[in-house]
Image (cartoon, helix red, strand yellow):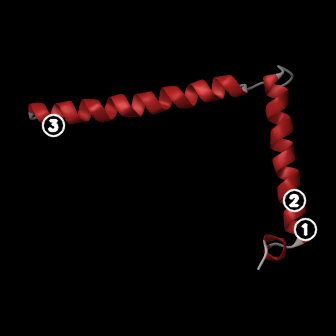
């Protein structure tokens, strides 16, 4: 069964419309036309959050190795 038969046209149209709206809002943020984080800021935040999780994990491992 193909994907075109999995969802009704109404559901697919709504999903496409929502996706396009998200893309337009993000493009507006990237251009400074809308408040919020632009794409590079969002990417940097994700990188910092990932680094923070890794450092916290390493800290927990070191604490366990010390016996705390």
Question: Could you give the CA–CA distance between mark 2 and mark 1, rounded to whole angstroms?
Answer: 6 Å
The quadrant in which residue 56 appears is top left
Residue at image x 79%, y 33%? 26
**Cβ atoms at labels 2 and 3 below 8 Å apart:** no
Q: Earlier in the sequence, mark 2 or mark 3?
A: 2
Q: Residue 67's x, y, as percent?
A: 9, 35
Disc 1 secondary structure class: helix
Element class at badge 2: helix
In the image shown, does 33 or 27 lie closer to the viewer? 27
Which residue shows up at 79% across the image and 75% down it?
A: 2
Q: Residues within 10 Å of mark 3 (few under 14, many from 20)?
A: few
Do residues under tags 2 and 1 come within 8 Å of each other at their CB atoms? yes
Secondary structure beneath disc 3?
A: helix
Q: Could you give the CA–CA distance between mark 2 and mark 3, rounded to whole angstroms?
A: 50 Å
Categorize mark 2 by other alpha carbons within 10 Å: few (<14), some (14-19), many (20+).
Answer: few
Spot the residue most to the top.
32
Q: Residue at x 84, y 71 (%)?
A: 4
Q: Decide: marks 1, 3 in contact (CB < 8 A)? A: no
Can residue 27 be seen in this snapshot? yes
Q: Quadrant of the N terminus?
A: bottom right
Report which residue position mark 2 lands on.
14
Pointer 1 local density, CA inside 10 Å: few below 14, some 14–19, many at least 20: few
Q: CA distance from mark 1 to mark 3?
A: 55 Å
Which residue is label 3 attached to? 64
Sequence-wise, the earlier of marks 1 and 3 is 1
* Mark 1, residue position: 10
Q: In which image quadrant can residue 11 be found?
A: bottom right
Q: What percent of the width, then of the height, locates residue 59? A: 26, 29
Q: Which mark is residue 65?
A: none
Q: Position of residue 33 (x, y in %)?
A: 87, 22
Residue at (31, 35) in percent of width and height: 57
The quadrant of the picture occupied by the C terminus is top left
């Amino acid at each position: 069964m193909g994907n075109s038969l999995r969802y009704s046209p109404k559901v697919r149209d709504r999903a496409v419309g929502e996706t396009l709206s998200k893309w337009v809002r993000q493009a507006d943020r990237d251009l400074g036309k809308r408040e919020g984080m632009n794409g590079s800021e969002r990417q940097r935040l994700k990188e910092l959050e990932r680094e923070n999780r890794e450092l916290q994990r390493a800290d927990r491992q070191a604490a366990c190795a010390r016996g705390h």
